[in-house]
């Protein structure tokens, strides 16, 4: 049974992957996404402002689905959850962080692009994997190939995905959603170009809504 967080992610189809340099812009960013019809965001722990941004978004918008990305250590996992993250994302599979998160009932999305990595995750109880960097690693063809031996596994690919190629991913039965920074570019946040974010999110959402996607079981 998929975690309800993943069901929400599936229903929206898109995860904005965000690098934010100024936590004072976090609240307006979240409001922009919600008003554009996408009440979901992943704040990556790649900047000093990230944890404060997660806290600010959680306080202002308690119902938004809020992720923390680039989790590399157990300490980061704990800090992100304490700040208010609903789910955690990593480019790899930090075993201690994964085990802790799952013991706390927090969905953890580790990176996996090989059968060995998928097997490691399955042994820990992972149900959904990040496939990163998607386009560099072979795109949807690679996902189809690597997923064949693992009928229960689903993926959220990120890396190189844009509005013009996301449909090829989202129509595959093993793809839960797609993520990427193309939806919310770092420079747009810096420059206060929230209208640009709105336009990009709405354009991608129109593609998602136009698709006949496989039923989620």
Image (cartoon, rainbow, N blue to C red):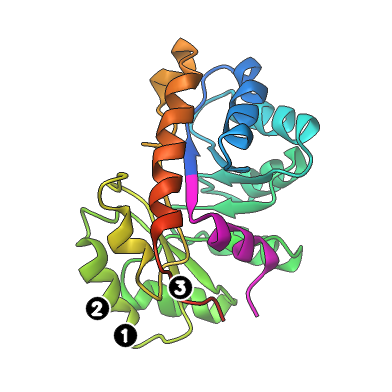
Of residue 198 and residue 9, the one placed in the foreground of this image is 198
Toward the top, the furthest residue is 191
User: At 52% across and 25% down in the image, what residue appears?
Assistant: 20
**Where does the image place residue 3, in percent across and percent down from the top left?**
67, 69
Taking the image as shown, residue 80 lies to the left or right of residue 19, namely: right
- Split into 4 quadrants, where in the image is the C terminus? bottom right
Choose top left, top right, bottom left or bottom right for residue 170.
bottom left
Q: Sequence-wise, which precedes: disc 3 or disc 2? A: 2
Of residue 16 and residue 104, the one placed in the foreground of this image is 16
Segment colored magenta: 1-15
Q: Secondary structure at mark 2?
A: helix
Dot 3, crowdedness within 10 Å: few (<14), some or many (≥20)?
many
Question: Quick check: 85 above or below 116?
Answer: above
Dot 2, crowdedness within 10 Å: few (<14), some or many (≥20)?
few
**Where does the image place residue 65, in percent across and percent down from the top left?**
67, 48
Label of residue 145 in the image: 2
C-alpha span from label 2 to label 1: 6 Å
**Where does the image place residue 191, in percent across and percent down from the top left?**
45, 11
Which residue has dot 1 on it?
Answer: 148
Instruction: Report if the CB atoms under discs 2 and 1 are less than 8 Å apart.
Output: yes
């Amino acid at each position: 049974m998929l975690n309800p967080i993943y069901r929400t992610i599936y229903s929206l189809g898109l995860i904005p992957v965000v690098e934010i340099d100024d936590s004072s812009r976090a609240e307006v960013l979240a409001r922009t996404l919600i008003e554009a019809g996408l009440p979901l965001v992943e704040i990556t722990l790649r900047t000093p402002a990230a944890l404060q941004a997660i806290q600010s978004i959680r306080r202002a918008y308690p119902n938004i689905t809020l992720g923390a990305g680039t989790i590399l250590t157990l300490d980061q996992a704990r800090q992100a959850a304490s700040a208010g993250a609903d789910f955690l994302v990593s480019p790899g599979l930090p075993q201690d962080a994964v085990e802790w998160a799952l013991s706390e009932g927090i969905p953890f999305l580790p990176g996996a692009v090989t059968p060995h990595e998928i097997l490691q995750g399955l042994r820990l109880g992972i149900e959904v994997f990040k496939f990163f960097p998607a386009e560099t690693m072979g795109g949807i063809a690679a996902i189809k190939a690597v997923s064949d031996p693992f009928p229960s596994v689903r993926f959220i690919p990120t890396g190189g995905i844009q509005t013009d190629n996301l449909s090829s991913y989202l129509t595959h039965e093993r793809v839960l959603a797609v993520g990427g920074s193309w939806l919310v570019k770092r420079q747009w946040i810096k420059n206060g170009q929230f209208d640009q974010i709105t336009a990009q999110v709405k354009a991608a959402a129109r593609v998602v809504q136009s698709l006949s996607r496989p039923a989620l079981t």
